[in-house]
Image (cartoon, rainbow, N blue to C red):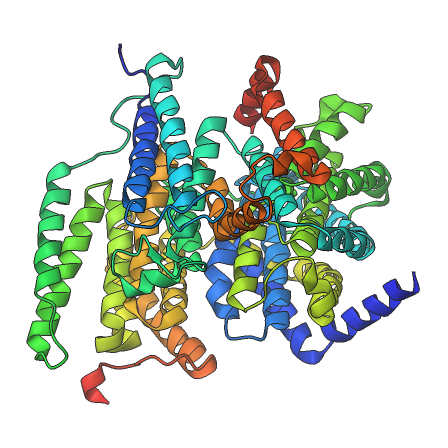
Amino acid sequence: MKITNGKDFWAGLMFVAFGLAFMWKAQDYAMGTSVRMGPAYFPTVLGGMLAVLGAVVLFRAFVSKIDNPLKVFPFKLWRIVVGLALGVVAYYTQPGHNANIAWEIGHTLLSGLAVGLIFAAFGERSLWVVLFSVVVFGYILKPLGLVAATVLLVFISAWGGHEFKVKEVAILSVALAIFSVLAFVKGLGLPMNVWPGIWE
Amino acid sequence: MESLFANLALGFGVALSVQNLLYCLLGVLLGTLIGVLPGIGPVATIAMLLPVTFTLNPTSALIMLAGIYYGAQYGGSTTAILVNIPGESSSVVTCLDGYQMARQGRAGPALGIAAIGSFFAGCVATVIIALFAPPLAEVALKFGPAEYFSLMVLGLIAATVLAHGSLIKAIAMVILGLLLGLVGTDVNSGVARYSFGVSELSDGIGFVSVAMGVFGFAEIIANLEQKEKREIFTKKVSNLLPSLQDFKDSWASILRGTALGSFLGILPGGGALLASFAAYTLEKKVSKNSANFGKGAIQGVAAPESANNAGAQTSFIPLLTLGIPSNPVMALMIGAMMIQGIAPGPQVMTERPQLFWGMIASMWVGNLMLVVLNLPMIGMWIKLLMVPYRILYPSILVFCCIGVYSISNSPFDVMQTAAFGVVGYIFVKLECEPAPLILGFILGPLMEENLRRAMLLSRGDALVFFQRPISLTMLVIAGLLLAVVLAPTVRKKREEAFVEA
């Protein structure tokens, strides 16, 4: 037995894992009867179907005539492990309502690092840089305001592309920041900080 | 018949109000603007612009979204003709002859005939919707939960049959979508399912996050991985009006494309993609000089462009009458309706006639705007095409992020979207088509609800789905579809067709 179609192998594995996970978690809920279905009924049935289909896809990976390498994308296990560990630390060190600003910033950085590492486990630079920039944006928009968040988002995400020209990116980020403030905050009236919270 | 005119009059009354005209225009412009960008199709465009419409009233929001849809569709064909990169899968065939025409210096007529064909198809499709939607909605009002459940099964099966690649994977994706759709508070028991104690998840996974992550972010990342190569042949398009000879050559193709597209759009699983492929194949078959196809035949642009616009519009029929999305774009529309607090289904027409007819009338208005605006603005779109991707994608990201953040003003939605970006990227790498997933995601709760009600009414007898004639018919069709696709000869043909694409 040799895996010929790596893509089917991982896809099958993914479906089986999802199916079983949904079935397993459904045990926490009431099953009910076929007349009065409980919250667990439909997910359990679907989860079972998904697991079976996944098994078929998995099986097909061994007999498929389509050749795909097993290494579909660069996968780095250590990044997931470290990322998850940092995530757990971040979860238990969440700042309370009256925590000081340094604590909050530190915690944001820590959780950002955790998320970034998990993203980074799955692929090339473009994947994790782009998604990381999005996460950073989400976290700093409230404390630092729209302008800073936009500029950071543009700078980090542009770094994920093939070419990175500092001057060009700088102009772009300023232009986009001005545009989004005018269009979204002034124009559409979205309730967002434009500048860092402590300034206002 | 009289009521038809009365209804259309009502619709135009709504659509022609200054406010709605403005939103329609804005939708068409934004749709074209983003649709023109290579590698971003209508699904991604709508997903990105969804949050913008949340602040509007439901009618204006849907009018704007519909405008975004056909704007993006049209923008996609512009890219196909000028750069040979299909902005979306339904303009893949437009590339074949459209780009060749552009290389021969006939980009103008190609764009012109695409616009004219689309406009004609749009007019016909609008009339078809107005004619067929009311009777269909009346039939649908008689549907019980069993019929609805079977209808959804049929719709989902049809969508998987038409998806690219492996059928089993497509069905698995549907089921995964259904399961993801179940996350959140169960309406019957009040139990928060699969929320893992996260309060945001007890409202369910954000629909915009799934759509934008899987279609938007994943597409951007996939585009970034390829070194960009864009060759723009036409720097300046002159002479947009096709010659008299062009019209003579293509009017029949436009008619055929419109007819075929309108029909295919209504079918579950149908829509623009299927329509354009089928129309191109048909043209090639009936043409006297089929050798010209692929070398710049104007029929090869006119027919699929008319067909995909017709199909794009008639696929609103199942959405508006049954509340069942036939393709991912319609799934996004349903999602938008739900967010606006409208339960999709046959009752929309009777309960909200202004929304229903206003939207239909706005389709015609929007199509007119496309022709009137886009032909003169083509120079601007070409300039946009020349903007390098390294500048485009950070800008797109900024708008996406602001949009997602504004849904609930919290970082949670942004995180969720990023997470679905990873998931979408993995799907792309594993060749799992995401379109069935989003359909399942939308239909998950509806399907469970109808299954529950059907089983309650039949006292737990699953045979009810086979005893009621309409329900049985739909399940039989679904079964036949599966059987046909799995039959060895068709399977081979299907694989070939998608490889060619």
Q: Position of residue B290 (x, y in %)?
A: 75, 23
Near-viewer residue (B142 or A91): B142
Query: Is residue B64 in sight in this rendering?
Result: yes
Looking at the image, which residue is at 37% across and 68% down?
B402
Quadrant placement of the C terminus of chain B: top right
Task: Determine the residue located farthest toward the bottom in the rendered image.
Answer: A200
Number of numbered markers: 0
Looking at the image, which residue is at 61% across and 40% down?
B150
Near-viewer residue (B166 or B398): B166
Task: Determine the residue located farthest toward the right in the rendered image.
Answer: B2
**Quarter of the view holding residue B391:** bottom left
Answer above or below: position of B494 versus A2: below
Residue B491 lies left or right of residue B365; in this view the side is left
Query: Is residue B103 in sight in this rendering?
Result: no
Residue A115 lies left or right of residue B150; in this view the side is left
Q: Position of residue B342 (x, y in %)?
A: 59, 66
Looking at the image, which residue is at 60% across and 21% down?
B483
Near-viewer residue (B292 or A129): A129
Near-viewer residue (B252 or B191): B191
Q: Position of residue B154 (x, y in %)?
A: 61, 37
Answer above or below: position of A40 versus B348: above
Task: Determine the residue located farthest toward the top in the rendered image.
Answer: A1
Quadrant placement of the N terminus of chain B: bottom right
Q: Position of residue B70 (x, y in %)?
A: 64, 55
Residue A36 lies left or right of residue A138; in this view the side is right
